[in-house]
Image (cartoon, rainbow, N blue to C red):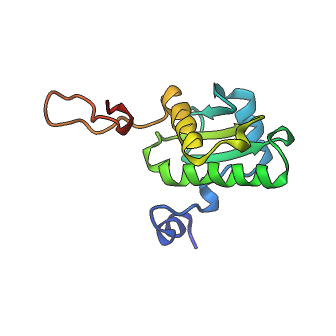
């Protein structure tokens, strides 16, 4: 099955292998030439030049916690990418590194940290403009 066909078959929110960073050489290139942004116990390393498509990797070391905690964090990070990848700019290859304390974050806290990393790095596509004045649509967190 071809790449595009496989992605279409999985639906809009699928997570096929073609959307993941899997090979050592891809991670090596990312770590050598990528830009870095940190927020709390998470670090984002990303490349926009010289890459094609949109691909994500997750890295969690033993300092995060035991195997159960590390695997839970990786699953949550992949799920956040799966749900929000349609809002990320392309081309882009990135990895999210979990550091000490990241495994104890709740879902909402982790989501806000990851979205904050993407915003800080300028990786989220511009939000839709409203019809009046061209201002950005209000964010759900901007409520008084």
Residue 38's place in the image compared with 60, above or below, is: above
Residue 57 position in % (x across, y down)? 68, 46
- The extreme front residue here reads 144
Residue 6 lies left or right of residue 74; in this view the side is left
Q: Residue at x 61, y 41 (%)?
A: 93
Image spot of residue 137 (x, y percent)? 27, 35
Q: Which of 5/71 is in front?
A: 71
Instruction: Residue 113 in the image: state x and y as whole percent.
Output: 57, 35
The number of discs equals: 0
Residue 52, compared with residue 83, is above or below; it is above
**Closer-to-camera residue (53/137):** 137
Q: Quadrant of the C terminus?
A: top left
Residue in the picture at 71% in, 43% down: 104
Determine the residue positioned at 85% across, 49% down: 66
Q: Quadrant of residue 94?
A: top right
Q: State the image coordinates of residue 27 (x, y, percent, origin top left).
A: 74, 41
Which one is in front, 47 or 39?
Answer: 39
Question: Viewed as shown, does residue 36 lie left or right of 83?
Answer: right
Residue 2 visible in the displayed image = yes
Do we see residue 26 in this rendering? no
Tell me the quarter of the image containing the N terminus.
Answer: bottom right
What residue do we see at 77% from left, 43% from top? Answer: 60
């Amino acid at each position: 099955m071809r790449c595009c066909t496989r992605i279409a078959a999985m639906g809009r929110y699928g997570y096929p292998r073609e959307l993941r960073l899997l090979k050592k050489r891809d991670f090596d290139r990312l770590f050598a030439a990528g830009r870095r942004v940190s927020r709390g116990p998470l670090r984002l390393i990303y490349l926009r030049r010289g890459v094609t498509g949109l691909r994500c990797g997750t890295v969690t070391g033993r300092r995060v916690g035991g195997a159960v905690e590390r695997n839970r964090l990786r699953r949550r990070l992949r799920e956040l990418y799966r749900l929000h990848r349609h809002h990320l700019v392309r081309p882009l290859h990135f990895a999210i590194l979990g550091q000490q304390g990241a495994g104890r974050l709740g879902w909402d806290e982790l989501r806000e940290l990851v979205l904050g990393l993407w915003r800080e790095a300028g990786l989220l596509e511009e939000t839709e403009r409203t019809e009046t004045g061209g201002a950005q649509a209000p964010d759900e967190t901007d409520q008084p």
